[in-house]
Image: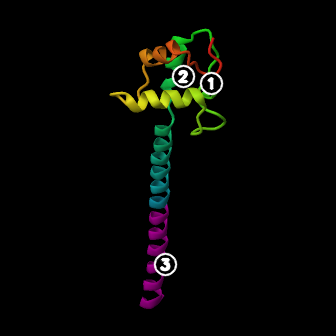
Amino acid sequence: MTRTQRLTANSSHQEIKLNKVCLSRIVVSGSIVSAIASLCLAAFARPPYPAILKQVYPKSTLSCNACHEGAPPKVNKYGTSVKGVLDKSKTPKVLTVAEIKSLDKKGIKPVGAK
């Protein structure tokens, strides 16, 4: 094998190694981006709200439709009222039992509340 052939063989082997390294970095980067994206999407959901509603209406079978009309972010009348309370709240995006009870006293109840 001549020197040129050896250099060509070595460079091909190095290219394959570099391609594997690049591919593994792309896969790892993609995984990280996917994880971050899923966390960002989770931030939009408000999973504590149904649990808080259950504290006020324990005999009810409440779902997303308690506040939403169809798929979020479209809200129904109750959802609009909750949004109004949250907009005035000192701790926006944190719905409290007291705030739900204040709506209840005004006769505003979520869909499915008993």
Secondary structure category for the residue under label 3: helix
- Residue 47 badge: none
Q: Position of residue 63 (x, y in %)?
A: 62, 24
- Residue at 61% in and 31% down: 76
How crowded is the residue under tag 3: few (<14 C-alpha within 10 Å), some, or many (20+)? few
| Quarter of the image that includes the C terminus | top right
Label 3 and label 1: CA atoms lie apart by 59 Å
Q: Quadrant of residue 11?
A: bottom left
Residue behind mark 2: 50
Q: Is residue 70 magenta?
A: no
Position of residue 44 relative to residue 86, above or below, is below
What segment carries the magenta color? 1-23
How crowded is the residue under tag 2: few (<14 C-alpha within 10 Å), some, or many (20+)? some
**Is 61 on the left or on the right of 90, as rendered?**
right
* Lower sequence index among marks 2 and 1: 2
Given residues 93 and 15, the one toward you in this image is 93
Q: Position of residue 51 (x, y in %)?
A: 52, 19
Label 2 and label 1: CA atoms lie apart by 7 Å
Q: Amino acid at mark 2?
A: Pro
Q: Nearer the viewer, mark 3 or mark 2?
A: 2
Residue 43 visible in image: yes
Position of residue 34 relative to residue 60, above or below, is below
Secondary structure category for the residue under label 1: loop
Label 3 and label 2: CA atoms lie apart by 59 Å
- Residue 12 badge: 3
How crowded is the residue under tag 1: few (<14 C-alpha within 10 Å), some, or many (20+)? some
* Lower sequence index among marks 3 and 1: 3
- Residue 63 badge: 1
Position of residue 80 relative to residue 28, above or below, is above
